[in-house]
Image: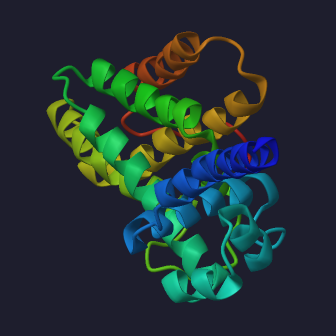
Amino acid sequence: MATEDSSSDSVGKAKSKERPVRATRRARRRMTGTERREQLLDIGRTLFAARGFEGTSVEEIAAKAGVSKPVVYEHFGGKEGLYAVVVDREMSRLLSMVTGALTAGHPRELLEQAAFALLDYIERYTDGFHILVRDSPVAQSTGTFASLIGDIATQVEDILGHEFKSRGYDAKLAPMYAQALVGMVALTGQWWLNVRKPKKAEVAAHLVNLAWHGLQGLEQNPKLVGRRRD
């Protein structure tokens, strides 16, 4: 009898050990197609930011996601397709943040809002910014970081055009000044991303200081002071 009881106890213990394993297996749920796609985008975004397009492989993306290579191809057609979607999302996010921030009525405050929006994006979505400022080897309908800066400058161009008209300046020059202002903020943002000093608000204040006081003292017909004329 002792032997039977012992045997029964052993069987019972074995069954009890099996239950958590079965429960764990039952708890696992296969990702939906949408969930898998988002997972691959998140992984790709991180790897592209750290290693660039050339330094990232489909094998590594698949391994990080715990899937086979064909799954990546199924969702994006390859590394190029995944990269293009990542870039398109980041460009849309940045453009939305900048255009959504331009709500003030006073021109100087609008400059502050634009500067803060770009610096906010750099701070919150550092991986995305790293990807955008790299030279992309992939042809995309959305273009490059330079074209994105152009889109943002278009928003600023309307503001400058109105101000130029009200002050008697040539409104046709507004697009050039808009490119200059947005480019200044973007390049400063790249520098600030690496050093992170001074604080974001101070960087924004100095950017607007240079832009605003430069615009305040703008000459209607600027002349070159050097000898070169062409």
**Residue situated in front as seen by the camera: 69 or 204:** 69
Task: Tell me the residue at 57%/75% (across/down).
Answer: 82
Task: Tell me the residue at 68%/39% (across/down).
Answer: 190
Task: Tell me the residue at 73%/78% (across/down).
Answer: 58
Q: Is residue 188 above or below residue 68?
A: above
Instruction: Tell me residue 193's x, y (percent).
Output: 69, 32
Instruction: Tell me residue 101's x, y (percent).
Output: 29, 32
Number of on-image labels: 0
Is there any visible trace of residue 56 in the rendered image?
yes
**Residue situated in front as seen by the camera: 29 or 138:** 29
Q: Is residue 66 above or below residue 150?
A: below
Judge left or right: residue 197 versus residue 143: right
Task: Tell me the residue at 68%/12% (across/down).
Answer: 198
Judge left or right: residue 180 versus residue 157: right
Please identify the quarter of the rendering in which residue 151 is found: bottom left
State which quarter of the image contains the C terminus. bottom right
How was this image coloured? rainbow
Q: Is residue 193 above or below residue 112?
A: below
Is there any visible trace of residue 224 in the rendered image?
no
**Residue situated in front as seen by the camera: 93 or 153:** 93
**Residue most toward the front?**
1
Instruction: Tell me residue 32's x, y (percent).
Output: 40, 69
State which quarter of the image contains the N terminus. top right
Instruction: Tell me residue 113's x, y (percent).
Output: 35, 25
Please identify the quarter of the rendering in which residue 135 is found: bottom right
Judge left or right: residue 213 versus residue 56: left
